[in-house]
Amino acid sequence: MKLFVYHTPELTPTDKVPECAIAVDVLRATTTMATVLAAGGEAIQVFSDLDQLIKVSEAWPTEKRLRAGERGGAKVPGFDLGNSPLDCTPELVQGRRLFISTTNGTRALQRVQDAKVVLASAFTNRAAVVQYLLEQQPETVWIVGSGWEGSFSLEDTACAGAIAHSVVQQTHLSLDELAGNDEVISAIALYSQWQDNLLGLFHLASHGKRLLRLDCLEDLKYCAQTDILDVLPMQQEPGVLKKHK
Ligand code: 3SL
C-alpha cells in the first residue's frame, strides 16, 4: 500500500486514479456525512450545483429526503439544513437521503469519484477508514483534503495525517515504504503536534475562525473528536455514498 496526501482537490493528478480515494472535509462536510450515515440516513448524494440538487431531489418523496446547502459557512435559504453535523439527529435523518451541496467538501468528492473505491473521512470516523485500509490493502490510496476554494486547510491535512499515522502504527511497513509523496510526512508531523489539542488547531485554522464568527463553536468541538463514529461512508455510484459498515 502506498499513501499519497493531497492538500486540495486541485493538487490531485489528472491523468490517473487511485485504487482508493479518501475525501476529507473535517469542517464540516465529511463530518456531517459520517454523522448522517451513523444516525441511520439512507444515503448521501452530493452536488456542486444547487439547482441540480433541487431538480434531482424533486423526484424523491418529500418524507424521504433532506436538502442540505451551505455557502460561505451559512445555510442556503430554503434548504432544510445547512452543514452542521449537530442538526443531523437520528430522529431527523433516519431512512432519509441527504442531498447536499457545500463549498468545498462536495467538490473534493466529485474530483475523485472515478476511483475504484471512494470513502469519506473526518476525525470522527478515522478508525473505521483505517480499518478498511488495513483489511483491504489497496495498492494506491489518495487522501484528499478539501481545503477552502483551492487553498490549504490545516484541519483537512491534519486529518490526512491522522489516517496515515494510524496506518503506520498498525502495519509492519516503515514510513518510507508507505509514503508515496512528501505531503504524507508533513501531514503526519502536523497531526502529531496537534493530536491532543485538535480544537486548539481549529481555532487557528482560517475556516475554524470563519465558523467561530458564525457562532459554530459547538460544531468545532464535535468535529474535533477522534474515532467516535464506527461508520464507513463509501461511494456506491458516482456522487452517492452509503454506509459500508
Ligand atoms: O466547504 C465545505 O464543504 C463546508 O464543509 C464548509 S462549512 O463548514 O459548512 O462552512
Image: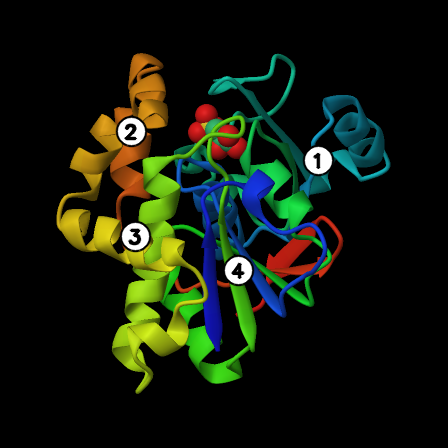
Query: In the drawing, what numbered circle is on residue 203?
Result: none
From the Cβ of disc 3, is ligand 1 less than 8 Å away? Answer: no
Q: Which residue is mark 4?
A: 142
Q: Residue at x 29, y 19 (%)?
A: 212
Q: CA distance from mark 4 to mark 2?
A: 23 Å
Secondary structure type for disc 3:
helix
Query: Relative to 228, does residue 81 appear above or below in the rendering?
Result: above
Q: Which residue is mark 2?
A: 205
Question: On the picture, is 186 further left or further right than 7?
Answer: left
Question: On the picture, is 242 further left or further right than 160?
Answer: right
**Callout 2, which amino acid?**
Ala
Camera sees residue 164: yes
Q: Residue at x 71, y 37 (%)?
A: 63
Nearer the viewer's eye, disc 4 or disc 3? 3
Q: Residue 118, percent across and down? A: 62, 60
Nearer the viewer's eye, disc 4 or disc 2? 4
Q: Residues within 10 Å of mark 2 (few under 14, many from 20)?
A: some
Mark 3 and mark 1 lie on one chain; the one further toward the N terminus is 1
Q: Nearer the viewer, residue 39 or 208?
A: 208
Secondary structure type for disc 4:
strand
From the Cβ of disc 2, is ligand 1 less than 8 Å away? Answer: no
Q: Residue 236, percent across and down? A: 71, 61
Q: CA distance from mark 1 to mark 2?
A: 25 Å
Camera sees residue 228: no
Query: In the drawing, what numbered circle is on residue 47?
Result: 1
Nearer the viewer's eye, disc 3 or disc 2? 3
Q: Which residue is mark 3?
A: 186
Question: On the picture, is 231 further left or further right than 176?
Answer: right
From the Cβ of disc 1, is ligand 1 less than 8 Å away? Answer: no
